[in-house]
Image (cartoon, rainbow, N blue to C red):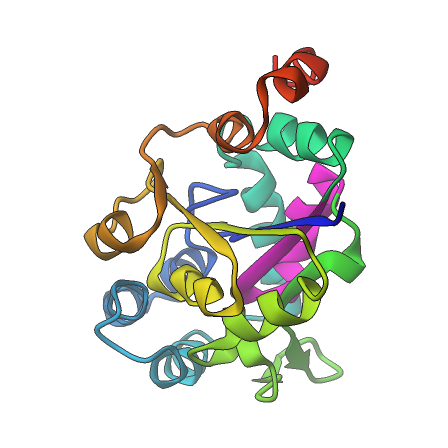
Amino acid sequence: MKQVILFDCDSTLSTIEGIDVLAERAGVVDQVVPLTNAAMDGRLRLEEAYAARLDLIRPDAGTLAAIGQLYIDTRVDGASQAVAALAALGWEVHVVSGGIRQAVLAIAGFLGVPDARVHAVDLRFDEAGHYAGFDTASPLARSGGKAEIARRVGAGADRLVMVGDGITDLEAGEAGATVIGFGGVVRREIVASRAPHYIDRADLREVVKLLAAPDELARVEVLLR
């Protein structure tokens, strides 16, 4: 049986919103955070916010390495255990994020998710490491992108699940995914009201408890400690 689960990164695997941390370091947080919140709450289309935020921040390659480590340092309780347990139960684990791929790869690798199963937006840099744009063709830089990724990686799956905190994560439902809203870091009422399942506790082991049968939980009990 093919089982595929997709985790959002920001405010799901990690307690931070990477783009907002970048904005703070660039001194443009007051301009960027409202764009992030509006996009995640569904008041602004993602594509309208994406380029605007990066044009304000203009992150360099070195800064992204620091954000990648910060993702690891601020990982949500139970993230490592949940990914290990799901993998042991035969789930194919992916990370799907509208965040910056170079930074998201760091936490995904730490959690044991291979690079090929990390879906995020690549940035481009010039020879000096300065920001030179982003992959505008990435579906994750526009609304509906997570549905596209879910449809592609979930092709032929018997079970397809999306875990995330924002309205873009709900889009995966359009591809047949069962959406688990995660409010352990940030509670977004639109997600809490629309997601078929919702977790308020800031512990990703709750995802495993929701998906696994009693005998499966017994098999991975040690991994969940």
Q: How many numbered circles are shown?
A: 0
Query: In the image, is residue 135 above or below residue 41?
Result: below
Tell me the residue at 52%/58% (across/down). 177
Q: Residue 157 location, x and y as percent?
A: 69, 56
Q: Residue 160 location, x and y as percent?
A: 59, 53
Q: Is residue 179 left or right of residue 208?
A: left
Query: In the image, is residue 71 above or below residue 104?
Result: above
Q: Residue 207 location, x and y as percent?
A: 50, 33
Of residue 195 and residue 224, the one placed in the foreground of this image is: 195
Tell me the residue at 34%/63% (across/down). 167
Tell me the residue at 62%/58% (across/down). 103
Q: Residue 138 location, x and y as percent?
A: 60, 81
Q: Is residue 189 left or right of residue 185?
A: left
Tell me the residue at 26%/44% (across/down). 187
Of residue 137 and residue 93, the one placed in the foreground of this image is: 93
Query: In the image, is residue 35 above or below residue 3?
Result: below
Q: Is residue 115 left or right of residue 218?
A: right
The image quadrant of residue 57 is bottom left
Q: Quadrant of the C terminus?
A: top right
Q: Look at the image and say whether residue 149 sits in the magenta stretch.
A: no
Q: Quadrant of the N terminus?
A: top right
Q: Look at the image and say whether residue 94 sits in the magenta stretch.
A: yes
Residue numbers of the magenta segment: 92-112
